Amino acid sequence: MVDIPSPTGGEIDMARYVVDRLARAGIDSELQLVDEGRPNAVGHLSGSGDGFNLLFTGHMDTSYSGTEDYLTGDGFKAKAVERDGWIWGLGSMNMKSGLAGALVAVEAIARAGIRLKGDISFAGVVGEIEKAPIEEFQGVEYSGYGAGSKHLVTHGVTADFAILAEPTGLRICTANMGYIWLRISVSGTVAHSAFRRQSGHINAIQLMTDLQADLADWIENYEASHQFMGERANVTIAAIRGGDPWRLARNPYDCHLYLDIRTVPGQSTEAVKRDLKRCLQRFATRTGTPEPKISVYVTDPPMLISEDLPVVGALAHAQKAIMGDRPPSIIRRPGADGTHFTRYDVPCAVFGPAGRMHPDYAGQTMHAVGEHVSLDDVLTSAQVYLAMALHLCDQTAPDSDLGGS
């Protein structure tokens, strides 16, 4: 899988590979078109019809293309390298190892001829990576943040529960942070740079620099006020744009600051916007300038499912049987498609093999040293997926609603 390049917008070869694997195992499979030349890979293994239906899912797109000049090393290339029981390569962590583990588990059930009470579905989806089209950055290569999963669940592929094979270090995840991407804009005056000292000139870049001091105070208070399961919400000043580098003879007439805001269960986008707006209003009053404008272009709410759901119970039972222990559940910080399934009444637990660092790189991050995964962890994940599917999907589902999250 790592050897098949699948950047966001270019997932079709990976989708064809998954569908071919499913078909060879005797599983009904199809390519579900999301955009032109960009399909989800979907398979179904039918049960007898009276048990819990389960969906295994994960994204096929990778965090990078593998051609970026600023990324070096085996972990950033679409070519798998095996060293001492670890696979290095683009997508090995996020999240082809999880997809592989789930795919092997579903194949094992199909090839063994086991017919459970409930259906088992598998879906490799496009467009999950945290990317979004804005300004001149348009096209399918920027169409992430759940594009494939939202299409999947609104076009007939549903279940009682879902297992998302995202990296969790073999921990059960029952919560996920939400996120807000927004742009804050300030305006300056159109003028020649040679006349900067004349009265009435407002330099938008300098104004934004002043605003960042106010935002630093707001961020500190925001992060201290919102926490869940031991994790704090956080804000990152992720990008800034202002002025015209091709024409420095002009005073910067606009400047834009871009924030990545992470939210925890219990928060809402609208409450965050109101709180931030109050900060911007105070800045406008203090400086005697127009209130900076907010433009929100990505939102996903936080996810939280109950520990009492059958999917969590079956996953915990399998984890303890295979691994000998069931550590406490965790909340994930990066964005994930579990939110979309849960919001569409498919409660989604997250459990995957990747996320554990190679011992030689303890204390560092995957995005710094490159993606890698332990093959032993991939095997363990496949065993847990198999055990939990056999347990959950052979239970008789109640006639009444399950109560969602």
Image (spheres, rainbow, N blue to C red):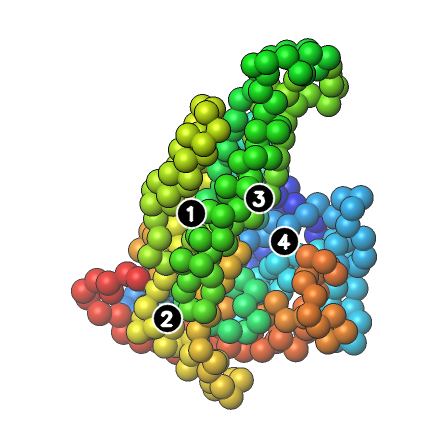
Q: CA distance from mark 4 to mark 3?
A: 39 Å
Q: Is residue 354 visible?
A: yes
Mark 3 vs mark 2: give the one in front: 3
Task: Give the distance between the C-alpha atoms of the residues marked 4 and 2, in whole angstroms.
Answer: 28 Å
| Of callouts 1 and 3, the N-terminal one | 3
User: For the residue marked with disc 4, what is the amino acid?
Assistant: Tyr
Task: Pick out the residue farthest to the left.
Answer: 400
Nearer-the-camera pick, 359 or 231: 231
Mark 2 and mark 1: span between their CA atoms? 23 Å
Q: Within 10 Å of the Cα at label 4, are there few (<14), some (14-19), or many (20+) other Cα atoms?
A: some
Q: Is residue 77 above or below residue 34?
A: below
Residue 123 seen by the camera: no
Find numbered disc 4 in the image and state the secondary structure of the residue it sits on: helix
Q: Position of residue 63 (x, y in %)?
A: 64, 50
Q: Position of residue 10 (x, y in %)?
A: 64, 41
Mark 3 vs 2, N-terminal side: 3
For residue 293, above or below residue 368 = above
Q: CA distance from mark 3 to mark 2?
A: 37 Å
Disc 3 target residue: 237
Q: Do callouts 1 and 3 mark residues in contact (Cβ within 8 Å)?
A: no
> In which quadrant is the N terminus drawn?
bottom right
Q: In the rendered image, which quarter contains the C terminus?
A: bottom left
Badge 1 marks a residue whose secondary structure is: strand
Which of disc 4 and disc 1 is earlier in sequence? 4
Q: What label does residue 17 carry, if any?
A: 4
Earlier in the chain: of badge 2 and badge 1, it is: 1
Looking at the picture, tell me which residue is in the foreground, 353 or 175.
Answer: 175
| For discs 4 and 2, the disc positioned in front in the rendered view | 2
Which label number is shown at residue 311? 2
Kindly report the distance in space between the C-alpha atoms of the residues bearing marks 1 and 4.
30 Å
